[in-house]
């Protein structure tokens, strides 16, 4: 939206380090506003999932084969959820809104919490213990998922 508005900023043009910094510096209210905005929510989710393959470390998931379905509350999809899938197999990671695969694990999480986890600004185990991350299916893949990615440090760290 910033690019369309002529602000000269395109989300795709930001480095992942800058994106991580933006999320780290954002307040809970700012992340919630992003998560509830009807257009920005989808733009940001699409961008995070697009970048997953770039930061996937195949060596860390050498013998992993898993399908994770993501459910984000407050969405416009079926049952009030936005949905994505991440497939890790044969040393590759692919994510998209629907890959048509049967999930091993389904993770339900608030969008703002996902943004924080995906950028290394929150620990999945802490959110899991407090009930902010719900898992249906196999728990171990859900807890290990973050370890298969090299999440860059903030540009201003």
Image (tube, rainbow, N blue to C red):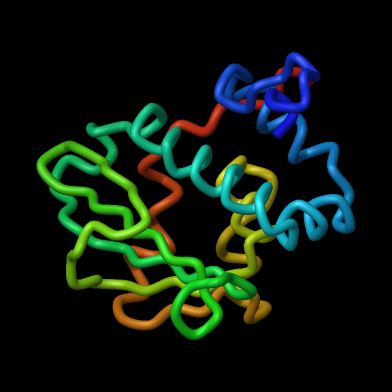
Q: Nearer the viewer, residue 107 or 58?
A: 107
Left-right relation of 47 to 110: left
Horizontal side, residue 60 vs residue 110: left or right: left
Across and down, in percent, residue 118 comes to 56, 46
Quarter-of-image position of residue 12: top right
| Residue beneath the point at 32% across and 63% down | 68
The reply, left or right, for residue 67 in relation to residue 77 is left
Q: Residue 37 location in percent, x, y?
A: 74, 57
Residue 121 location, x and y as percent? 69, 45
Q: Where 110 falls versus 79 (above or below)?
A: above
Residue at 36% over, 42% down: 148
Q: Is residue 5 above or below residue 98?
A: above
Residue that appears at 24% across and 43% down: 61
Residue drawn at x 74%, y 40% is: 23
The quarter in which the N terminus is drawn is: top right
Does 92 appear above or below 135?
above
Rendered view: 92 above or below 104? above
Where, quadrant-wise, is the C terminus in this rendering?
top right
Q: Which residue is farthest left?
A: 90
**Percent x, y of residue 89:** 15, 47
Residue in the foreground of this view, choosing between 50 and 75:
75
Total number of numbered discs in the rendering: 0
Front-most of residues 135 and 41:
41
Q: Nearest the camera: 25 or 50?
A: 50
């Amino acid at each position: 939206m910033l690019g369309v508005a002529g602000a000269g900023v395109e989300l795709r043009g930001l480095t992942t380090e800058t994106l991580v910094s933006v999320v780290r510096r954002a307040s809970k209210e700012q992340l919630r506003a992003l998560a509830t905005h009807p257009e920005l929510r989808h733009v940001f989710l699409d961008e995070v999932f697009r970048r997953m393959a770039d930061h996937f470390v195949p060596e860390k998931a050498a013998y992993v084969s898993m399908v994770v379905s993501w459910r984000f509350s407050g969405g416009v999809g079926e049952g009030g959820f936005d949905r994505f899938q991440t497939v890790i197999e044969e040393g590759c990671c692919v994510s998209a809104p629907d890959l048509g695969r049967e999930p091993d694990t389904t993770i339900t999480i608030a969008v703002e919490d996902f943004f924080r986890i995906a950028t290394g600004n929150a620990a999945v185990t802490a959110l899991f213990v407090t009930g902010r991350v719900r898992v249906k299916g196999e728990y171990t893949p859900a807890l290990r998922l973050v370890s298969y990615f090299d999440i860059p440090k903030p540009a201003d760290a």
